[in-house]
Image: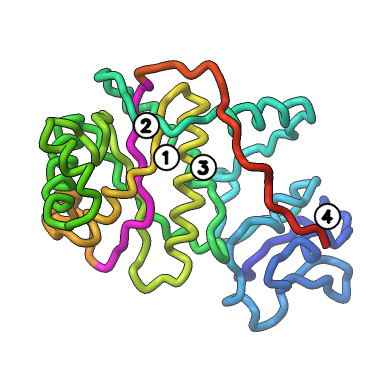
Amino acid sequence: MSLICVDKENCNRDGLCAQACPPGIIRMGEDGFPEVEKGAEDFCISCGHCVSVCMRGAMSHERLPMENFLPARRVKPEAAGEVAELMRGRRSVREFKDTPVDRHVLQELLDTARFAPTATNSQKVGWIMVEDPAATRRLAGLGADWLRGSNIFPRYVALLDRGGDMILRGAPHLVLAHAPADYAWGAIDCTIAATYLELAAAAHGLGACWAGLMIRAVAQHPPAAQALGLPEGRTVHAALMLGLPKYRYYLVPPRNKADVSWL
């Protein structure tokens, strides 16, 4: 069976599918209809560009069931300002309410983050969502154990000794992104995916902050990785504390101007 199937009654032979194919394995055949270059099927990254770009719905892909495609809504120009405001106004929240976030909201964040781009559409990012606030507190405690024995950030250790949570800041939830340890693009893919999730959280009115100390604790303190149930052969590259923000911020602090070289 061919990797792609063309409905020749609907195909207008405009060649857009061939032009949009990232690995360039689609070509226009002698009859003017698109086809996969012989022997090139293994180079397909299953990105779905060929199906998505066809305005007549004449293309289907063996690996990508049509029922799993979603309609791509055209974003209105005026929406760009709202997106920019969301991105500029996002804060790294480190103070949270005790109220847990509903599971369906957490699931929606993950459902959005799975659309983040990955190298060659590899989609190797995995997630661990810590939903139970009690489990989050236990992980914070394991992170504190690591921090006390690490001989770094002595001020944080002093604050820990005073009862402060310097690992997860009292957040009710924690989400971690991981990838195969031998995957060259794991850190980049997980970082992009976590950024997608962080912005989605802001759109839901949630607070989030990168949990860098937790990332290091998982890498250097085996009990933390064991408590997470991190699959063997996987590395955590991103972690976010999540919850309802305790405070509302009324101003956006200044940032340095972009350091840009124009060519």
Residue 105 in magenta stretch: no
Quadrant into which the N terminus falls: bottom right
User: Which amino acid does the dot numbered 4 rest on?
Assistant: Cys
Query: Secondary structure beneath disc 2?
Result: helix
Q: Residues within 10 Å of mark 3 (few under 14, many from 20)?
A: some
Front-most of 135 and 5? 135
Q: CA distance from mark 3 to mark 4?
A: 35 Å
| Among numbered discs 2 and 3, the one appearing first in the sequence | 2
Q: Position of residue 191 (x, y in %)?
A: 46, 53
Number of numbered discs overlaid on the protein picture: 4
- Residue bearing mark 1: 110
Q: Quadrant of residue 31?
A: bottom right
| Amino acid at pointer 1 | Leu
Q: Earlier in the sequence, mark 1 or mark 3?
A: 1
Q: Earlier in the sequence, mark 3 or mark 4?
A: 4
Residue hosting label 4: 11
Q: Which residues are magenta?
A: 233-245
* Residue shown at the point (35%, 18%) measured from the top left: 246
User: Mark 1 against mark 3, which lies toward the viewer?
Assistant: 3
SS class of the residue under badge 4?
Answer: loop
Residue corresponding to mark 2: 106
* Mark 3 lies on residue: 196
Callouts 2 and 3 close, C-beta under 8 Å: no
Q: Is residue 9 left or right of residue 139?
A: right
